[in-house]
Amino acid sequence: MRLSHGFVRGETLSCIYHGWGYAQAGNCLRIPAHPALTPPDTIRVATQPVEDGGGIIWISVGEPAAGPPRFEGLAPLRSMMVEADIAALEAVAGTKADGDLLDYTGNAPTIRLLLAPQGQARTLVHVLVAEGSSQAERIAASRAAEALRRAAEDIAHGGIAR
Amino acid sequence: MTRNAMIDEWYPVGIAGQLDAHGRKTALMGEPIEVGRGEDGNAKVTGANGRALPACIRYGHVWSSLGDPQKPLFAIPEADQPGRRLVDVGVVRVRCSPLRAVENFLDIAHFPFVHTDILGAEPHTEVQNYKVEIREDEDEVWATQVKFYQPQAAKSAEGGITTEYMYRVPAPTCSILYKTCPPRPGEWDVITLFVQPLAEDLCDVWPWMALFDDETPMTDLIHFQQTIFVQDRSILENQIPGLLPLDPGMEIPTRADLTSVAYRRWLKRHGYTYGAQLVAQ
């Protein structure tokens, strides 16, 4: 079970399954099934440096050389999981990704997608829109992202893009 | 590659009350099968190429096997006890190993976190010591004297009670839970988890109950059990690794997990490895 399914209470990250709580250093603080037990120091999870930049939470694997990228003029809209790889998203967008960035212009204003592959056929996508977008523009951008997802998943499942 | 011992076991493949002549297409351990009612009125199960498979009806369900079962389906004596209501809960498709589904059913430490305010609630999270054994005569895994505080143990429970449980694993993908029966002290409610392995990482789960409860509408009994199981599904579909490890690895068992430890040991001893992760020896 990934700890990302879990919950934060105070300064402790807890697992959704059995409630084991972990400190910021990754060591286990608490095993609720055995409240009197002090967890041995060997029970610990890997930790990564984390930074909040421009409304996006970044982690780095290993020691980062620089801070996370900034996207001037853009603000985060939503995140979504796509059951397709980056190639399928590129095919629908009609453009190549620049590293982990893909700009997509459908019938709505351009949105920028931050791509985080999750294994072979799944991509976690964070959607950014222009800062100061109206509510109507944000809704349109959200729908455009969903249409992109559906089309990419059609390709991934052997279908033809709509 | 040796023949998997699980081939010769019985598995649930449908609800007996829903059998019809038309038949229902499903699968068993990767093989497409069809479950229907034959001209003689009995359950009829056909495998690939139309071969006839063993079939029987028991505990509200149709049971079948791809192989040659060496013994009859396990007994649940309480199923024939007068006064019990027998509840066909239905089916829940879960994208997980059939063995993972059973293991999760044997676990109580997750109640306060996954079934919050129903089967458990903080701060009542402690799992007290209980007894676990592999009963050699019956060849079953048993956990007894399991106790847990529950805010709403059953549809018929009013307010929190400390519930006592017993667990039984009589077959690799089936478990039977005996649970304190609020309206009838001295008797046990029976809640089962019958798991149909569709593939190593996909199963249909058929919960079934035999309860002393004359009050609660059938719909509510079914909804209660479905609510609980759908909460479990969100856990089961996200477990890593997907297959059940039978050898010690990354997971850290505690005393609360002794039932799971015994279940895994029993599976390994019998070579029940369909849905299991085998580490190179």
Image (cartoon, rainbow, N blue to C red):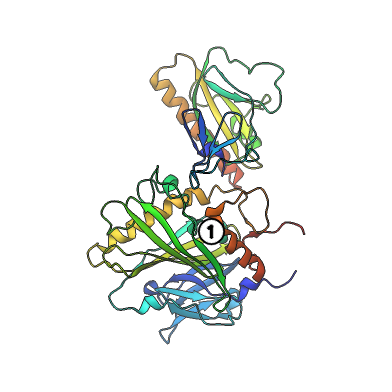
Taking the spot 76% from the left edge, 57% from the top edge, the residue there is B280
Residue B235 image point, x, y percent? 50, 48
Q: Secondary structure at mark 1?
A: helix
User: How many numbered discs?
Assistant: 1
Chain bearing tag 1 is B
Q: Viewed as shown, does residue A136 lie left or right of A55?
A: left
Where is residue A102 drawn, in percent x and y? 61, 26
Front-most of B130 and A72? B130
Residue at the extreme bottom of the image, as rendered:
B40
Where, by quadrant of the figure, is residue B222 drawn? bottom left
Q: Is residue B238 left or right of residue B273?
A: left
At 66% across and 66% down in the image, what residue appears? B268
Residue wearing tag 1 = B103
Up-down relation of residue A123 to residue B130 (above or below): above
Which residue occupies the foreground of this view, B85 or B110? B110
Q: Residue furthest right?
A: B281
B60 shown above or below A22: below
Q: Position of residue B210 (x, y in %)?
A: 35, 70
Amino acid type of the residue that numbered disc 1 sits on in the rendered structure:
Glu
Q: Say which quadrant the N terminus of chain B sits in.
A: bottom right
**Residue B55 rendering spot, x and y as whole percentages:** 50, 80
* Position above or below: A34 against B89: above
Visible in this render: residue A103? no
Residue B71 visible in the shown view: yes
Q: Quadrant of residue A2?
A: top right
Q: How many C-alpha atoms fall within 10 Å of the one at disc 1: few (<14), some, or many (≥20)?
A: many
Placement of the C terminus of chain B among the 4 image quadrants = bottom right
Furthest toward the front, the residue is A36
Q: Classify residue B188 as left or right of residue B38.
A: left
**Residue occupying image coordinates x 44% and y 45%:** B113
